[in-house]
Image: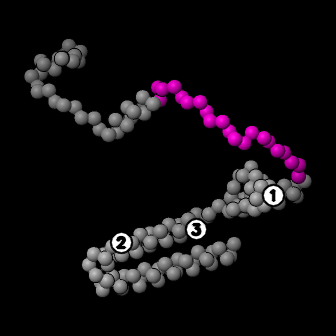
């Protein structure tokens, strides 16, 4: 079957037909367009349908707002949590998240060393394990100091 491009046809160029290969990006883009054209599903029903309002003095509201900001959550989530459980779980700070990420990396290193030890013997891995142990103890101390100071 010949495809026309204006007045020029592929058969006129005397080129062998090449199999076209679509890139992964083109495939994904095409799939996205297909999904976009489909009818959208019904929105999910919200479980929380009751609205509760309360009145505060300026001083009370400032106190609530300060505690909400310290917890790092929205006012709605803060009030909901306080009313139902009596406490608010504070969101993890970026600094603590970075420290936990480092700790996860060290755990990955330990798993790699354990794999090496099981494959080739324990003698070559002992020094690396001691170094990792010191790093992990230091990270745990940093985390515990941060949590004690809050």
Percent x, y of residue 6: 23, 15
Q: Residue at x 68, y 76 (%)?
A: 149
Marked residue nearer the N-terminal end (1 or 3): 1
Say whether residue 53 is magenta.
yes
Please identify the residue farthest to the top as the structure is shown. 7
Whole-number angstrom distance, CA of label 3 to CA of label 2? 24 Å
Q: Say which residue label 2 marks.
A: 112
Magenta segment, principal secondary structure?
A: loop
Counting other residues with Cα less than 10 Å from the Cα at mark 2, is it few (<14), some (14-19), or many (20 or more)?
few
43 with respect to 59 (left or right):
left
110 with respect to 39 (left or right):
left
Q: Viewer-proximal residue, 53 or 60?
A: 53
Residue 97, visible in the rendered structure? yes
Q: Which mark is residue 64?
A: 1
Q: Say which residue label 3 marks.
A: 96
Q: Which residues are magenta?
A: 36-56
| SS label for mark 3 | helix
């Amino acid at each position: 079957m010949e495809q026309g491009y204006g007045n020029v046809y592929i058969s006129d160029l005397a080129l062998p037909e090449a199999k076209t290969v679509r890139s992964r990006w083109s495939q994904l883009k095409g799939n996205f367009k297909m999904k976009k054209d489909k009818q959208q599903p019904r929105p999910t029903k919200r479980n929380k349908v009751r609205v509760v309002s309360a009145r505060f003095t300026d001083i009370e509201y400032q106190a609530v707002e300060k505690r909400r900001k310290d917890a790092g959550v929205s006012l709605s989530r803060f009030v909901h949590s306080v009313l139902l459980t009596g406490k608010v779980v504070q969101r993890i700070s970026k600094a603590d998240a970075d420290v936990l990420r480092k700790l996860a990396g060290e755990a990955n290193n330990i798993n790699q060393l354990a794999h090496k030890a099981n494959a080739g013997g324990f003698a070559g891995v002992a020094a690396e394990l001691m170094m990792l142990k010191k790093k992990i103890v230091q990270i745990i101390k940093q985390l515990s100091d941060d949590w004690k100071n809050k």
